[in-house]
């Protein structure tokens, strides 16, 4: 699948602005400019590539990820329902994964954010942080058969949401028939690699969006059936009650602090980075 994003030229005003952004710098770290009649992007790309691994810019990208993670934690705290909480929790986990990924000079991503982070975690401390990350999301104890079952339920919800959706829901652009293969095959790819726990991040995103559309526009029977499945799913992630969510918020606050401590030391000492 190719994704086309139109962006204003201001986003590419200078190499310094791009070097500070986790999701932007990695795009220009490699020779990725295809068409550039005036040479502006080419000049910026060369500067980004030259300075990408400097500690100064890695620090700025990590700090941007930390700020986003803290913002997501506030969103979990302010969530009005378990479904809202788990959606915000997914954002928090994505940004925590992003912090660790960009510290190691790798590009952050969405679907494979946890699966691609796993090979980078080598030391005992890193492996422990990684397990804490999975536990914070609630997927650390999910088995492969459970992951496959939840994927099947998610696909059923996705298909039904496409049929019944009439009004807008958050992130509705992901509810499109062309996305279905990406959801199914992209998730199965991770499961078959042994990353079934990591696949729950992708499953959760679509399960929540699909269920929201069904609860809004589905029949009474739809709402009952798919609502029950979502309750069971949230219970499996350990966020099915206010008390459970409150505990998860506390756990995530501590996790962000430990990720910050780790990233500070990594940036200061890693031979991968340059002064």
Image (tube, helix red, strand yellow):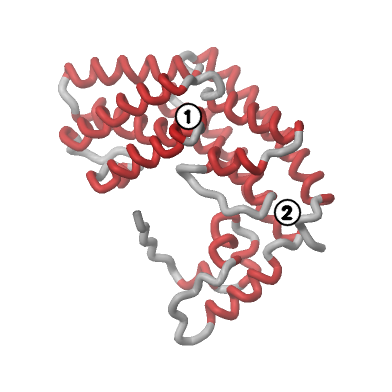
Can you say whether 234 is above or below 183 in the image?
Answer: above
Residue with the most extreme bottom position: 38
Q: Nearer the viewer, mark 2 or mark 1?
A: 1
**Disc 2 secondary structure class:** helix
- Which part of the image, by quadrant, shows the N terminus? bottom left
Q: Earlier in the sequence, mark 2 or mark 1?
A: 2
Q: Position of residue 235 (x, y in %)?
A: 45, 15
Q: Are marks 2 and 1 in contact (CB under 8 Å)?
A: no
Residue 206 or residue 117, whichever sits in front:
117
CA gap, disc 2 and disc 1: 31 Å
Q: Which quarter of the figure has residue 256?
A: top right
Tag 1 residue: 196
Is any part of residue 66 visible from this angle?
Answer: no
Residue 216 or residue 97, whichever sits in front:
97
- Which part of the image, by quadrant, shows the C terminus? bottom right
Can you say whether 202 is above or below 86 in the image?
Answer: below
Asked if residue 169 lies left or right of residue 90, the reply is left
Q: Which quarter of the figure has residue 68?
A: top right
Who's the residue at 76% across and 39% down the image? 262
Tag 2 residue: 59
Who's the residue at 51% across and 28% down the image? 197
């Amino acid at each position: 699948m190719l994704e086309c994003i139109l962006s204003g030229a201001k986003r590419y005003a200078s190499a310094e602005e791009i070097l500070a952004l986790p999701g932007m710098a990695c795009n220009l770290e490699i020779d990725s400019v295809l068409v550039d009649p005036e040479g502006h992007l080419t000049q910026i790309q060369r500067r980004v590539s030259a300075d990408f691994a400097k500690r100064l810019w890695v620090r700025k990208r990590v700090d941007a990820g930390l700020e986003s993670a803290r913002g997501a934690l506030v969103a979990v705290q302010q969530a009005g329902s378990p479904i809202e909480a788990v959606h915000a929790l997914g954002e928090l986990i994505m940004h925590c994964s992003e912090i660790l990924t960009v510290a190691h000079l790798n590009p952050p991503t969405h679907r494979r954010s946890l699966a691609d982070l796993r090979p980078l975690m080598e030391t005992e401390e890193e492996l422990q942080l990684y397990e804490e990350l999975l536990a914070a999301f609630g997927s650390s104890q999910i088995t492969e058969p459970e992951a496959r079952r939840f994927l099947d339920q998610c696909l059923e919800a996705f298909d039904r949401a496409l049929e019944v959706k009439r009004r807008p829901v958050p992130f509705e652009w992901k509810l499109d028939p062309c996305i279905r293969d990406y959801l199914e095959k992209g998730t199965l790819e991770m499961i078959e690699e042994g990353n079934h726990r990591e696949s729950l991040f992708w499953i959760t995103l679509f399960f929540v969006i699909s269920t929201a559309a069904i609860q809004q526009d589905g029949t009474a029977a739809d709402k009952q059936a798919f609502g029950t499945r979502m309750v069971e799913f949230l219970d499996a992630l350990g966020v099915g009650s206010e008390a459970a969510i409150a505990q998860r918020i506390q756990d995530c606050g501590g996790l962000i602090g430990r990720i910050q401590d780790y990233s500070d030391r990594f940036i200061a000492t890693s031979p991968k980075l340059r002064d």
